[in-house]
Image (cartoon, grey):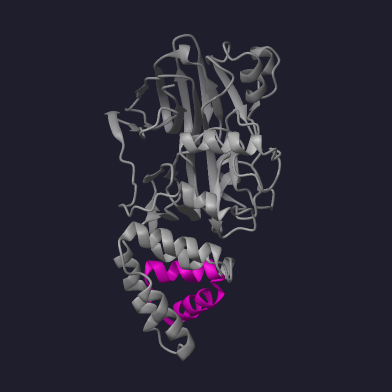
Amino acid sequence: MFVPIANTPRNYAWGSATDIAALLGVSSSGSPEAELWLGAHPGSPARILTPLNVGGFATLADWIARNPASAGLSGPRLPFLLKLLAADAPLSLQAHPSPERAAEGFAEENTAGVPLEAPTRNYKDPFHKPEVIFALSDRFEALCGFRPVADAITDVDALIAAPGLSAGAVATLVSFRSSLEGQDSEVLRRVVGSLLSDDASVLVEAVTDAAASAPATPAVDTVRLLARHYPGDPGIVVSLFIHRVTLRRGEVLYLPAGNIHAYLSGFGVELMAASDNVLRGGLTPKHIDVAELLKVLDFTPMPVPYLAPERPEDGVDLYRPDVPDFELVHVVATETVSPTIALPGVAIALATAGELTLTGSSGTIQLRRGDAAYITADEGALQVRGSGELFVATTSL
């Protein structure tokens, strides 16, 4: 069964006023439009455009909760959430928990009687939240994963040598540099914990002042950007220890549990496990629980976690992370390339360009740019015809 769906963009302050509206082919609201959710998450469930075809249910959340079998699921939860994400300003510095820690933290806060709606609550559900981001814009800027401390020291040295610094600022930076000796993961745990827990205002000011006159590098550019949006925030200094990543269109990052990250700017397709569990570490007015964040973070330096695709056939790129909750299929169909997509489970399809016809074992649907549909697993393999670009989120659960 093919079920057309739609939603209203969420107007977070960091969002773009144009990107989502342009893709959907509608007029901009004039306000920031940050995310368009296509799924059954209760925070913003997708609307069903043909409710009479699914028993009268108005949203995916209602349909799946009350009749999961007819939606092609074994239980009342869709395990993934597909989004359009459009950032004109940096998001919070954050990480997500493992499945085990999510379940434990959710149970602990329930036992403690913390209301689900409380702004100080860390765990809104018992699920993990790994995610992938596919860049739609020509550039998508992000911070992602800890890098070797030696790389951060190189940038700190450049800040120390910046022209025009006061003697006090130089002394502060030299003292900070001396604290960076030791095994990488131990240094990162200690320094990040201190920056987020203690008064780091003098160091933040010294780093910000130095970056204003230091030669441009990715780390220096990041400090300048964050200082404009979040002056005085200790996340400005934490950013020195994180990879600055520039995705080109079509490149993908995978953010597993424990990965520290922050999207800075750009437009993309995001796919994640359907969870609302975010542990923040700065660059936000929202709740920050440093102790819980330190439990969740993976302090092991690692390369930038690009996710390379499999290519089962021409026109199809399959992004399959090491979790069963979701996988992402990117399809480019042309007059001469009409790919077939195998569905291991239910799916959500989103057309981002052109006009396409999807045909399954019992149904068919036409999708134009900006159109989306929920697809039950019994449609099996999907034949894609037409000319355009399509994203399909599905699951092996």
Image position of 48 with respect to 217: above or below: above
Residue 313 visible to an observer of this rendering: no
Q: Quadrant of the C terminus?
A: top left
In this view, the residue in front, 252 or 201, is 201
In this view, the residue in front, 1 or 151, is 151
Image position of 190 with respect to 306: above or below: below
Q: Is residue 205 magenta?
A: yes
Q: Is residue 389 left or right of residue 312?
A: right
Residue 370 visible to an observer of this rendering: yes
Image position of 15 with respect to 212: above or below: above
Q: Quadrant of residue 361?
A: top left
The span shown in magenta is 199-227
- The residue most toward the front is 112
Rendered residue at 46%/64% (across/down): 238
Q: Position of residue 248 (x, y in %)?
A: 37, 52
Q: Is residue 154 magenta?
A: no
Number of marks in picture = 0
